[in-house]
Amino acid sequence: MIQKMIRVGNSLAATIPKVYIDELNYKIGTPLKWEKTDNGLLLYTPQKAAKSPSSIDPKVAKLIEKLSKKYSQVWQELSKL
């Protein structure tokens, strides 16, 4: 699909076809990021950051710690592969 640049104030803009807006569930205010590539510009929505360890349920954190200790030797052996 070919898009043309349009003038918006002192800037240039390209519109996103409705079919893609609907498919990607874009709304006004959706964060978009541009990245220069060898083929031109790549437009994408940045991924949301993963939860920080402090926001993990304490019960889950305790279980992870318990399993990490119990299987520490296994994790060390796997890391050598």
Image: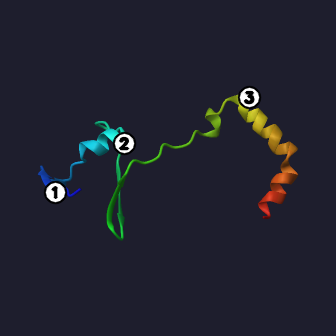
Q: Is residue 56 visible?
A: yes
The residue mark sitting in front, 3 or 2, is: 2
Q: Provide the secondary structure element on which disc 3 rests.
A: helix
Give SS at disc 2: helix
**Which residue position is annotated with label 3?**
59
Q: In the rendering, which numbered label is found on residue 5?
A: 1
Using the image as rendered, state which of residue 31 and residue 38 is in the foreground. 38
Which of the two discs, 1 and 3, sits closer to the camera? 1
Q: CA distance from mark 1 to mark 2?
A: 21 Å
Up the image or down, 12 lies above or below 59; here it is below
Counting from the top left corner in percent of width and height, residue 81 is at: 78, 64
Tell me the amino acid under the disc marked 3: Lys
Q: Earlier in the sequence, mark 3 or mark 2?
A: 2
- State yes or no: discs 1 and 2 in contact (Cβ < 8 Å): no
- Amino acid type assigned to the residue bearing label 1 in the image: Met
For the residues marked 1 and 3, what is the alpha-carbon distance in whole angstroms? 53 Å
Q: Residue at position x 39%, y 47% from top? A: 45
11 horizontally vs 31: left or right: left
Q: Residue at x 85, y 44 (%)?
A: 69
